[in-house]
Image (cartoon, helix red, strand yellow):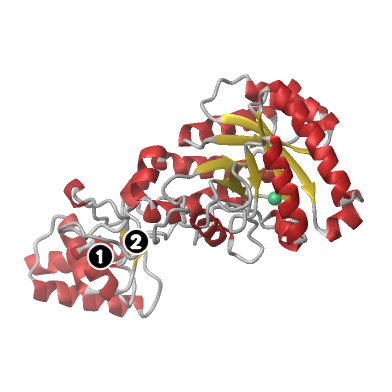
Amino acid sequence: MCGTCNGDTAGSAAAPTTTRPESASTSNGAYPARGKPKSSPYQSVQDYISNVNNFKIIESTLREGEQFANAFFDTETKIKIARAIDNFGCDYIELTSPVSSPQSYEDCKTICGLGLKAKILTHVRCNMEDAKKAVECGVSGVDLVIGTSSFLREYSHGKSMELIQKTALEVIEYLQSTGVEIRFSSEDSFRSDLVDILALYKAVDKAGVHRVSYMANSNPGVVGCDIELHCHDDTGCAVANAHSGLEAGATHIDTSVLGIGERNGITPLGAFMARMVVTAPDYVTKKYNLKALKALEELVADAVQINIPFNNPITGFCAFTHKAGIHAKAILANPSTYEIIDPSLFGLTRYVSINSRITGWNAVKSRVEQLGLKMTDEQIKEVTAKIKQMADIRPLAIDDTDSIIRSYHLDLQQ
Ligand SMILES: [Zn+2]
């Protein structure tokens, strides 16, 4: 939480893939080929406070993401990213403070003028000057932030809690007069005094802000407004924290594409979608343009000159690759045995590897059928042994394996 803010498709043209018949779809994120289960172990327990089936995304690639070490977004790139995020279906797009630089101010105005469906927000320090600049740009909402921990109060802005509250109430009153949506956020909330920030949240809630940001588990009883959660990923828990936050009553989650942001970033949009499509499949598949995720991630990866990590949920190059014989056999019979997410929801395909010493004959059989060759099970087992023999000597590519299969098949004809 601002607490310490303190490839490729899985398949390829040459690769054997399987596709799931449409009729096999279920609504629980797992998709047994036959029948619809009554409940899913992947879905979280519902209670009156949980918002896992009804949350909004504040996409912050153009704010938090601009704090990523490699990020430099020129105006054209910002526009492309804003349009792609809008096309994906995020509710809000958060922009860098217009006070940061003259170009940031111009870019904020430009993006506000694009006519996107998403509401445009900007994230500014909680003072009157910043708030006025934000409103000048034409944003739909202003995200106010101020450090509340003793660390930030002492080493960052030097203000007491009393002064923070007084300033916040003045800025909120001004913003209310302009009609924009208002969010108030403490920074370094985890390390702030609980009594201090609850009192502050109570005061800003009473003043009429639309949202406060962060503290999901104690806020619902303290404020009546919405609750936004901004999770940093220093300990690899951003998605888990975001999910837990929704269960505990948060309503809005901050994300960035590929998680880019300060240090190692925040809740990644794609990984969060992976989690939520399992938890709340109906809500997520209806609301978000999941098939646009890969292109969006590639756009941002390219803009900040990074590769999509191999283990990225959904879009990592091996996210839907199955290799071991036991896995391949089961996957070919029913994908839900080893896949929690259906790749086709994201416009992707699975890949069953047949190029290793751990390849099983069922996977080879599937490839033989894809190649249009006729062989008995005994013959397939024999050619599988040949593939394993070669794979013990050197790494194999799909073309190598296909050559072994084809030459074995040719020998059978003679
Ligand atoms: Zn942050």
Q: Gap between marks 1 and 2, in whole Å?
A: 11 Å
Picture residue at 73% right of the left edge, 28% below the top: 175
Say if residue 408 shows up in the picture.
yes
Q: Tell me the kind of residue under disc 1.
A: Ile
Position of residue 170 measured from the top left corner of the image (x, y, whole percent) = 81, 33
- In the picture, the disc for residue 353 is none
Q: Which residue is mark 2?
A: 340
Nearer the camera: disc 1 or disc 2: 2
Kind of residue at disc 2 = Ile
On the image, the x and y values in percent for residue 209 come to 67, 36
User: Pointer 1: what residue?
Assistant: 331
Q: Is residue 29 left or right of residue 200?
A: left
Q: Secondary structure at mark 1?
A: helix
Q: Judge the density around disc 2: few (<14), some (14-19), many (≥20) Cα neighbours within 10 Å.
A: some
Q: Quadrant of the N terminus?
A: bottom right
Q: Nearer the viewer, residue 391 or 110?
A: 110
Q: Is residue 7 visible?
A: no
- At mark 2, the secondary structure is loop
> Which residue is depicted at the point 84% across and 40% down?
166
Towards the viewer: 256 or 356 = 256
